[in-house]
Image (cartoon, grey):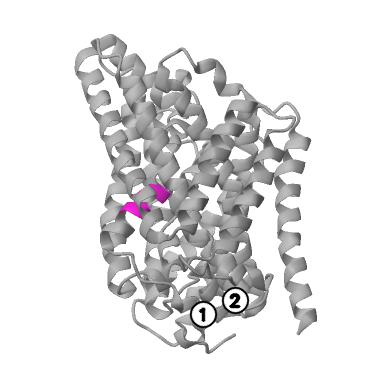
């Protein structure tokens, strides 16, 4: 509804306790945004991935940060991009933005869980590697972490924030270990992957390169998460910009330096999508006489991934809660736990739906295939609300000439990059045995989930 202000945020949604400070937001941003699995995904492309990280920083990460900062300054409050889209385009589009953002994370959680499970097998060196493609192991590991994080969040942010804080610290430590291993490997053995002026330039006409760029954009996504918890942050107009600056510099540094270190430690062709980092650390450790490198990296990366899951679970559960307050989703989703003061029904619903999606992905698919399909669905569903975000700012800021050129550039470049990532995610990888089935699962599955949200919306309108 055009013309709304912060006072239009449901009163019930502003009753959540304000417990997050700058340190919590910095660690949450790092835990949520830095997923070290993206290092292996990028490094598989070779040295040109380093240029893609810098390109993604310029055409996606920075635009997202600028737009989130201005939108949060103009319209703070619990709900973030849901509120911004609703302010610019009305209830229907606000609902679609909130719904697709929430449901994209229900698809994203299984990829994070499967990655953590795949990395954890390297804790015992080579003894447990056979479990990596074992469906029962992956399911039990993933569901244990999922429901453990769910119950922590139900118990309150004061408890749950420690999971994401520990995850952020583990990610920092793992990234430092990867970079150190890369430097040591360079000094003792030279680079395993040669970096030249010819191979560092990305081939932007290649589908594989564009797919990697889409993944890099997804890796940089997450600055919009903090404002979703705006009602639970102490002085959000000051804390959010400060946390974004600190964490943004750290995130870009981790991704670029970490990918370079992987390429130094292993040839690009030998880097595995899930186990690439522990493999590289183990290889360096064996050559240096420190076999603990691989298991230590596996532990830190698994803990960091679990912390990231906790961070996203905390933030995204607020969307069905806020939308439930406004009666577009079942009213039960807006229920607050009488003891802990948390949206416990939304959290339980989120955990249940993620469980169903995980089981559906694991059935009749290898772990690798399930991972890739869920990843592409995450890009499609998760970037739709970002498209809304980039077009909402010009509408909300209309009539204001302050920073108009910077705003226009950020919104235009960010929108174009986001749209490119969505389109690229519908293209099957070259090695896909059945491209039509791949498209059906990725595009068809995304459309079914969007249609489910539309059904909720129109049923709620019918009750009015």
Q: In the image, which residues are magenta?
A: 27-33
- Name the mark on residue 71: none
Where's residue 410, x and y in %?
A: 42, 65
Where's residue 195, x and y in %?
A: 33, 25
Q: Which of 33 and 304 is in front in this view?
A: 304
Q: Is residue 48 above or below residue 251?
A: above
Within-10-Å neighbours for mark 2: few <14, some 14–19, many 20+ = many
Where's residue 308, x and y in %?
A: 43, 46
Q: Does residue 32 belong to the magenta stretch?
A: yes
Helix or strand or loop: what does disc 2 sit on? helix
Question: Can residue 409 be seen at all in this image of the molecule?
Answer: no
Q: Does residue 287 belong to the magenta stretch?
A: no
Residue reaching furthest front?
339
> How many numbered callouts?
2
- Name the mark on residue 12: 1
Q: Which residue is drawn at 54% across and 81% down?
A: 87
Label 2 with label 1: CB-CB less than 8 Å? yes
First of labels 2, 1 by sequence position:
1
Left or right position of 455 against 297: right
Left or right position of 435 against 221: right
In the picture of the structure, the residue carrying the numbered disc 2 is 325
């Amino acid at each position: 509804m055009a013309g709304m202000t912060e006072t239009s945020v449901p009163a019930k949604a502003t009753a959540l306790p304000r417990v997050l400070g700058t340190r919590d937001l910095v660690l949450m941003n790092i835990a949520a945004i830095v997923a070290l699995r993206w290092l292996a995904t990028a490094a598989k492309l070779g040295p040109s991935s380093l240029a893609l990280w810098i390109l993604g920083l310029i055409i996606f990460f920075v635009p997202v940060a600028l737009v989130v900062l201005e939108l949060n300054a103009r319209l703070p409050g619990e709900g973030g991009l849901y509120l911004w889209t609703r302010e610019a385009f009305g209830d229907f589009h606000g609902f679609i933005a909130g719904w697709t953002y929430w449901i994209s994370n229900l698809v994203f959680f299984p990829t994070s869980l499967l990655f953590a499970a795949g990395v954890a097998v390297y804790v015992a060196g080579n003894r447990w590697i056979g479990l990596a493609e074992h469906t029962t192991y992956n399911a039990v590991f993933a569901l244990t972490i999922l429901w453990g994080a769910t119950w922590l969040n139900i118990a309150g942010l004061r408890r749950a924030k420690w999971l994401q804080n520990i995850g952020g610290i583990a990610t920092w430590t793992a990234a430092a270990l990867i970079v150190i291993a890369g430097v040591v490997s360079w000094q003792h053995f030279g680079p395993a992957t040669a970096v030249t002026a010819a191979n560092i330039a990305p081939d932007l006409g290649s589908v594989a390169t564009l797919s990697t760029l889409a993944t890099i954009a997804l890796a940089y996504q997450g600055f919009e998460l903090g404002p979703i918890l705006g009602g639970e942050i102490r002085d959000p107009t000051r804390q959010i910009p400060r946390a974004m600056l600190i964490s943004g510099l750290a995130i870009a540094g981790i991704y670029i330096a970490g990918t370079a270190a992987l390429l130094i430690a292993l040839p690009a062709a030998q880097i595995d999508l899930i186990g690439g980092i522990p493999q590289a650390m183990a290889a360096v450790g064996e050559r240096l006489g420190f076999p603990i490198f691989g298991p230590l990296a596996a532990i830190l990366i698994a803990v960091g991934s679990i912390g990231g899951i906790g961070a996203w679970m905390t933030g995204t559960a607020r969307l069905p809660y806020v939308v439930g307050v406004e009666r577009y989703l079942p009213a039960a989703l807006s229920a607050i736990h009488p003891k802990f003061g948390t949206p416990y029904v939304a959290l339980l619903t989120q955990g249940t739906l993620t469980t169903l999606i995980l089981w559906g992905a694991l059935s009749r698919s290898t772990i690798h295939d399930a991972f890739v399909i869920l990843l592409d669905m995450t890009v499609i569903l998760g970037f739709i609300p970002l498209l809304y975000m980039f077009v909402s700012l010009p509408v909300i800021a209309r009539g204001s000439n302050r920073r108009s050129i910077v705003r226009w550039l950020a919104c235009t470049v960010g929108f174009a990059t986001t749209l490119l990532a969505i389109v690229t995610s519908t293209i099957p990888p070259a090695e896909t045995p059945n491209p039509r089935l791949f498209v059906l699962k990725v595009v068809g599955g995304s459309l079914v989930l969007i249609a489910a949200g539309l059904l909720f919306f129109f049923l709620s309108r019918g009750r009015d």
